Image (spheres, helix red, strand yellow):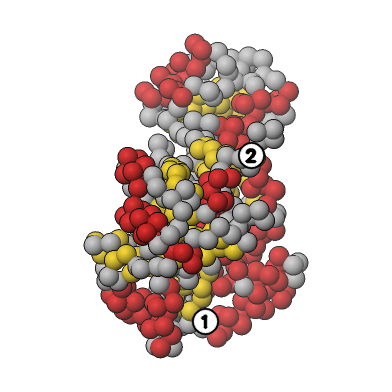
Amino acid sequence: MDYLPIFLDVAGKTVIVDGGTTVAARRIERALAAGARVRCFDPEPGAEVRAFFGHKNLTYHDRVPVEADFAGCLVAYGASEVAERDALLYAAAKRHGALANVADEKDYCDFITPSVVERDPLTIAISTGGAAPVVARILRARVEAMLPAAYGRLADFLSGYRDRIAEQIKGGTARRRFWENLIEGSVGDAFLAGDEALAAQLVEQDLASGTNDLKRGEVWLVGAGPGDPDLLTFKALRMMQHADVVLYDRLIGPGILDLVRRDAERINVGKRAGDHVMSQQDITTLMIDRAKTGQRVLRLKGGDPFIFGRGGEELEDVAEHGIPVIVVPGITAAAGCGSSAGIPLTHRDHSQSVVFVTAHGKDGLLPHDWTRLARHDQTVVVYMGLRFVAEIAEAAMAQGVPAEMPIAVIDNGTRTTQKIVAGTLADIGAKVAAAKLKGPALIMIGTVVTLRGKLGVETVAREDSHEMELVAREGL
């Protein structure tokens, strides 16, 4: 983050706008809306600027500003598109302790003017730190489309209860939860449906009942998917924004933790073979203890929590203590990695069934019956097997599986760092060793692996959004 995001109080303070352009008009409009005293300088202002003439808080000067004009100024905007005026404005603003912003001149900017979505009193500001303003404008358009105007009125309506809620609901966590229940519960539903009277009645009922009991917490078991943040479900995102404490493992993809509520406590409980940050029993005990204090505990797991995620084991103990549990499924690694690698799990000509197995048990490599699993009409997906790729291949061949059976190892699937190593049982061990894969990785065995690259699907690392996308290109 290159800039500190803040909202500046300019009410009653002096803001200078140098220029008569469309950009100058937008700066004047925003400053006046925020209650500033605006001084505009330009010998020949355009029609959009002249439209503000007569506003009680606007003073117009039909000339170029001089240094003395900046005394007592809080913010100075340069929008003249004249290099000499921009340089004078920035230098004068600095000498008088004002914040400067010159349009399209990053070296003359103390701050970035964001794209703004306004739902008074709700304001959403979007910025790329000056790197790609067009991206900010596109995002603004999307937010404008998805955010009903009624949300601003809802914020204004609820602001009338702020003091009473602060007085009656004691404790920051209790108040936050009360507010969340109001906005996302029946009160918010009633208001957004246009029934303000019912919304007010429901608020009064909630205040009268004192709905601030934190004695009973909850445990939320949430699947974070295979790594790409865009593969999270809406429900997972909602839970992540409401949790009080988050217990996360090492398989969580980059950027996913950034979506967790900012002030939620985060605890790394990641485990890998031979390196446990916290034992399984300690993790379960911690979840139970935190829930008993009234906290909403989010157990965030890579993939799907009920597919080789030990989610069922954890919840058995939680349920025995009478703690409410919510499970949110995630896209399991088999589905996510197969799609991102262009390898279907099933195909009418290759595989009529798919089976998921784990390579790793309590005592190391599991002794699977590979002749039963690795059949010509079935896809085998092996979880937690990166360390054992060579051993798996050797065991399968020793049991009679053909050495030419196709196999692929997908490392960091769905992420921008994804790597795919494909081969046969005979050569996959050497190929994976040479690739020096870091994991997490998934193994796929079956003739479906031969379809990789034939379905017109590519994995593309998008640097502008840090997303892994599947792009279908016709004719390839």
Closer to us: 252 or 454: 454
In the image, what residue type sits under mark 1? Thr
Separation (CA) of disc 2 from disc 1: 55 Å
In the rendered structure, the answer to whether residue 204 lies left or right of residue 467 reads right
Secondary structure under badge 1?
loop
Which of the two discs, 2 and 1, sits closer to the camera? 2
Mark 2 neighbour class, 10 Å CA radius: few under 14, some 14 to 19, many 20 or more: some
Judge whether residue 10 can be spotted in this image: no
Going 53% across and 23% down the picture, which residue do you hit?
104
Going 39% across and 88% down the picture, which residue do you hit?
321
Secondary structure under badge 2?
loop
Q: Position of residue 420 (x, y in %)?
A: 45, 43
Q: Position of residue 138 (x, y in %)?
A: 63, 38
Q: Position of residue 59 (x, y in %)?
A: 60, 28
Going 49% across and 60% down the picture, which residue do you hit?
374
Q: Position of residue 79 (x, y in %)?
A: 57, 22
Identify the residue at the far left of this view. 274
Residue behind mark 1: 211
**Mark 2 or mark 1: whose residue is earlier in sequence:** 1
Closer to us: 65 or 213: 213
- Quarter of the picture containing the C terminus is top right
Mark 1 neighbour class, 10 Å CA radius: few under 14, some 14 to 19, many 20 or more: some
Residue 431 picture quarter? top left
Residue behind mark 2: 456
Going 61% across and 26% down the picture, which residue do you hit?
24
- Quarter of the picture containing the N terminus is top left
In the rendered structure, the answer to whether residue 393 lies left or right of residue 126 reads left
Is 276 rendered above or below residue 208?
above
